[in-house]
Amino acid sequence: MNEKVLKTLEYYKIIKMLENQAGSEPGKKLCHALVPSADIHTIKENQKQTGDALSRIWQKGSLSFSGIHNIGESIKRLEIGSTLGTGELLRIDSLLKVALRVKTFSRRDDEAERDSLDDMFEAIEPLTNLKNDIERCIISEDEIADDASANLKNIRRQMKITNDRVHSQLSSLINSQSGHTYLQDALITMRDGRYCVPVKQEYRGNVNGIIHDQSSTGSTLFIEPAAVVELNNKLRELEGKEADEIQIILANLSMACAEHIYELKTDMKILPKLDFIFAKASLAKEMKASMPEFNDQRQINIKKGRHPLLDPKKVVPIDIHLGKDFNLLIVTGPNTGGKTVSLKTVGLLTLMGQAGLHIPAFEGSKLAVFKEVFADIGDEQSIEQSLSTFSAHMVNTVNILNQADQDSLVLFDELGAGTDPVEGAALGISILTFLKNIGSRIMATTHYSELKLFALSTEGVQNASCEFDVETLRPTYRLLIGVPGKSNAFAISSKLGLPDYIIEDAKSHIDSDNEQFEDVLSEIERQRIQIEKDQETIAVYKSQIKSLKRDYELKTEKLNEQRDKILNKAREEAVDILKEAKETADEAIKTINKYGKSGNTREMEKSRSNVGAKLKKNQVGSSIKAAKPKKAYKPSDFKLGTGVKVLSMNLNGTVASLPNAAGNLTVKMGILNSKVNIRDLEIIDEPDIKAPGLTRGSTGKIKMNKSMNIKTEINLIGKTVDEAISQLDKYLDDAYIAHLPQVYVIHGKGTGALRNAVQNHLKKCSYVKSYRTGEHGEGGAGATVVEFK
C-alpha cells in the first residue's frame, strides 16, 4: 500500500492507538510495523485471530503481556556456552512469568470449540522449575540470595562472624581512653575494602597498624590497626570465595537455561505475537468494532460505519455501499456537511480491515480487498514546488491515473476544484469516466451540477448527498445514497438575513435548465422527508399491532387456562358423585334383597328414606358450584358504560351494547369485546373521573364514548411545539378517562425539540405513571410510550 494514502487517511493515528493497547515493547514493535495486506487469505486469518482474541477477552477479561523482554542476545550467548549475568537471567524469569500467566489464561473447558489461537497457546512453555530456580537464587540484579547454594550460605555466615569480630576490636579501640586522644573522630571507616580508623597526624606513632589513606589536608591518617589486619585479610579472602560461588551459581542457572533454548525461543516468538493480537482485540473492544466480511468481488457495504478518530458520542454513523449496483459514487452537498468525513471513513475502514483490524461498524459489514487505495483529499498547495492548489491536485490525479487498475479504490475530494467551473467539471467527468472504464471503485465529492447530471444519466454511476437541515442551518451528517445533494446557497442566505430582492435577482442569473434541476432536487428532498415520516408512523403502527396481538394472545391463553381448570374440577366432582351414587345403589340393592324376601316393608322403607336423604345431600354438596350474582338483574338495569364484572371470566369491564331480547349484551374488557348474558354479570361501582359540571350518569357516558372512539396513539409530526402540547394535553385526558393502559405519542426524530417538549410535558402530568422512548419496532426515537397510573 502506498505511503501517501496511509498518511492522507491518518492510518498511523490508528496504529498509535493500537500501540497503546500492547503491553510489551516487542508487542508494540509488531503493532508499529502493521500495514494493510492485499492477500484475502492472510486478511481473513488475521481477522479471525482478532475475533477469537476478542471473544476470550469478553469471556475472561483482559490479559496483560507486561514483562516480555527481547532475550535474543542472551539466547545467542547460551548457544556458545557463555554464563549469563543476573540482569539477563531476570529478563528470562520475567518472560517465563508472562508465559505462565498467558498459559493460565488460555485454559478453557474441554467442550469449548478450538479457535485460531489454541495452537499458539499450546506451544507456550512456562518452564516453571527453571523460573522458580532463578527466583530462588536471584533477588535483584545486585543481590544473590543466601539460599542460592549451601556453600554461599556458609561463606556469608563466616563473613558475618568475621565482620562482627572486626567491629568488636575497632569499637574497643574507639571507646578506650587512648582512642579519644588519638582519633580524629570516633567512627569506623573503609579504605580499599579494609576497615580503618581516622588517627590524628601527630599521634601516628601511637597506633600500630597500616596507613591506607590520608585526608586532603594531611591532618588525618586512615590506619588499619594491627589487631584487625588478619581479620580484614580473612574478610577479603571470604569475599573472593563469595564472588567465585556466585559465578558458579550463575553458571549453573545458565546451563539450566541452555537446556531449554528451544522453549525460550518459542516463547520469545509467540508471546509478542499474542500481545499484538490481543492489542488488536482490545482496540476493537474500545471502538465497539466488529469483524468485516471480505469478498473478492470488490464490493463494499458498510453498515452504520463510524470514523474511528472522531468522538464516538458525536459521530453520526453512515451506510455506504459500492461495487454491486454501481462502481462510482458521486457525493454532493454543502460545505461542512460531512462529505469529506464519509470519504475518509470508507478509505480508513478499508485500510483497517485489510490490516486485520476490526472496523467500527455493525455486524455484517462487507469490505473488498484492494491492492491499492488512492486518495486525493485536502489542500495540496505546495509553496516549495510553486504549485497552485489545482496544479497540486492535478499532479496527484496524474499519478493515480498512471497506477490505478481494477483492483484499486480511488477517493477524490472536490474533484476539479480550483479552476474554471466549466472546465473543472469537464475534466472531472473525463477522469471519472476513465477510472470507471478500467474497473476501479471510485468515490468522489463535488459541488458541480454537471457531475450530478453525469451520475443521473450514466450507467454504473450513482449520486449521493450529505443531508442538510435548512431550518437549523446545520448538517445532519447522514449520507443518502441515490439522492443528489443541493448547495442550498439561496435557502441558507435567506435564513441568514440576505434580502429577498437580492436572492430573486441572483435566481434570474441562473439558466432555466439549472433552475429546473434544482427544483427537481428540492421536490425529491421533500418527498424523501415525507417518506421517512410515513415510515416512522408505519413502524409505530406495526409496534402497536404487535403489542395488541401479544396482549390478546396472553388474555386468550389465560381464559383457556381458567376454562380448563373449571372443566377439570367439574370432571373430578362428577366422578366423585358417580362413585358415591354407585355405592348408594349397591347398598339399596342389598337391602331389597335382604328384606324383600321376608316381606319386612318397614326396614325397606327405612332404607329408602336413608338413600333419599343421602341423594339430597349429594345433590346439594357435590354439585359444581357456579358463581352467581348477588342479585337478579333486569335488562333495564344495564346502560351503556355501566361497570360490570363477568363472573365466568372473573374480569371487569363496561357495557358496550344494550341487552337484546335473550338478555345478551356486549362487554368491553380492555381490548377484548365479549358477548355475555346478564345472568353472568354483576354490576360493580367504579370510581368515575368527573369533569366539572357533569353528573355521575353523564360521566359514565363520557367514559363509554372515549372507550369506543379514542385511539391508542396520537401523531404530532409536523406540528409546532405549542400546537402539539395543546393537542397532547387533551388526548391524554381522553385516553385516561377511557381507561387505556398505555398510549403512543408519535413526534418524529427531527431536531429533537418536539420530543423534548412532549417528554417535559409528561413529567408534569399527575396521572402519567411512566414514559419511555420507543424501542426497535415501536418507532425508536421517533415515538414515546406513555403508561397511565
Image (cartoon, helix red, strand yellow):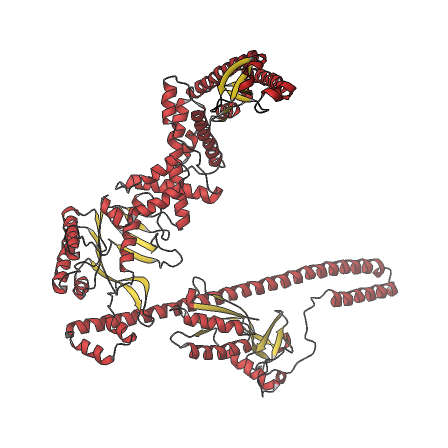
Q: Nearer the viewer, residue 340 or 670?
A: 340
What residue is at 21 percent from the left and 48 percent from the top?
408
* Image location of residue 236, percent across then percent down: 51, 14
Picture quarter with the N terminus: top left
Q: How many numbered dots are placed on residues in this image?
A: 0
Residue 634 found in image quarter: bottom right
Q: Nearer the viewer, residue 559 or 135?
A: 135
Q: Is residue 297 visible?
A: no
Residue 302 vs 74, above or below: the answer is below
Residue 216 falls left or right of residue 307: right
Residue 761 falls left or right of residue 78: right
Q: Nearer the viewer, residue 700 or 673?
A: 700
Residue 254 vs 376, above or below: the answer is above
Residue 49 vs 166, above or below: the answer is below
Q: Residue furthest front?
A: 202
* Image location of residue 42, percent across then percent down: 30, 39
Residue 520 found in image quarter: bottom left
* Image location of residue 394, percent across then percent down: 15, 54
* Image location of residue 64, percent across then percent down: 45, 38
Q: Nearer the viewer, residue 30 or 653?
A: 30
